[in-house]
Image (cartoon, rainbow, N blue to C red):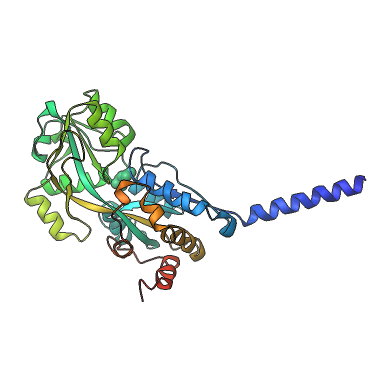
Amino acid sequence: MRMFKYLALAGAMATATASFAEERFITIGTGGQTGVYFVVGQSICRLVNRGTAEHNLKCTAPSTGGSIANINAIKAGDMDMGVAQSDWQYHAYNGSSEFEGNKFDNLRAVFSVHGEPFTVIARADANIKSFDDLKGKRVNIGNPGSGQYATMQVVMDALGWTMDDFALASELKPAEQAAALGDNKVDAIIYTVGHPNGSIQEAVSTVEANLVPVTGEAIDKLIADNPYYAAATVPGGMYEGSPEDTNTFGVKATFVTSADVPDDVVYQVVKAVFDNFDRFKRLHPAFETLSEEQMISDGLSAPLHPGAEQYYKERGWIQ
Ligand code: GLU
């Protein structure tokens, strides 16, 4: 009897160890909880985890600091995949701008997602009608590690501005910025993000506020000189207080990984998304207009990961 018990226990342990060893945990870097990256990561994981019984992948998508933090975490091997703005994908792969001296040769593109207008929203009582009006104001330029923080530096360089041009340059996270605007701690917030999003919805429901156009010669030049920027518009009526279209420039949210992540892992993640594409598109209004064709080409500057390439070839989307 004793012997039997022992054997049964050993058997159970062996089984447990075997299935544990086969499971692989993958982590996707996102952004703040009130942004859209968080929904991208959560949506991808939801679709991946529906198939765990077949492929043994278990996916989690925690909130992070955003684009730059995600790229750095993937480079360090702390995360497997992540969402990043197309401008920062470009610079990380090419070792330029913020990534000078920190080139990420092994960065790989998987697909792009929604467009992200560089968005400025201001309290109505601050009377900010153009980007120039931000001078002398209290502005949340975003948390270090976020895409908006880094892209804001590019815009300021293009305009010849420094932090001293603001009365205050705060570095609050997306989850904190709407309350700061509502509590009159800042006059305006900067956010590179898909629309509609929770953060700006929260801001306009707590205080009278308006979107601010980001236009002019310096912006036109940024768009003309850089393939990862394009003119962008936040549609009128999307947020209370902004009935007209707001013109600005924008980037694409892209999904990236490392060449060190195995092909079959990336293949299964891509398959989970595109085999269930209609379901994916229903998970956020910013995904509604996505098309497979655009997602596998727009905003991608690093080489495609071979696991993604394999799936796109199987579907006949690429040669
Ligand atoms: N574009 C932002 C970033 O790169 C994140 C926006 C979001 O979370 O949806 O950090």
Relative placement, left or right, of 217 versus 280 is left
Query: Relative to residue 228, is residue 60 depicted above or below?
Result: above
Pick the quarter of the image with the C terminus. bottom left
Q: Which one is nearer the viewer's eye here, 151 or 181?
A: 181
Residue farthest to the left, as pictured: 217
Query: Relative to residue 134, is residue 290 depicted above or below?
Result: below
Pick the quarter of the image with the N terminus. top right
Residue 52: give x, y in percent of width and height. 56, 54
Q: Which one is nearer the viewer's eye here, 228 or 275?
A: 275
Residue farthest to the top, as pictured: 183
Q: Which one is nearer the viewer's eye here, 171 or 112?
A: 112
Query: Relative to residue 74, is residue 185 depicted above or below?
Result: above
Q: Which one is nearer the viewer's eye here, 51 or 279?
A: 279
Residue 98: give x, y in percent of width and height. 27, 51
Which quarter of the figure has residue 222? Answer: bottom left
Q: Answer yes or no: is residue 261 visible.
A: no
Residue farthest to the bottom, as pictured: 319
Q: Answer yes or no: is residue 117 visible.
A: yes
Query: How many numbered marks are there?
Result: 0
Please give the name of the residue rendered at 21% of the width and 26% of the height, measured from the top-left corner.
207
Query: Relative to residue 232, is residue 141 depicted above or below?
Result: above
Name the quarter showing ligand 1.
top left
Please give the name of the residue rendered at 47% of the width and 53% of the height, measured from the top-left corner.
47
Which quarter of the figure has residue 2? Answer: top right
Residue 158: give x, y in percent of width and height. 13, 49
Which quarter of the figure has residue 35? Answer: top left
Residue 228: give x, y in percent of width and height. 23, 58
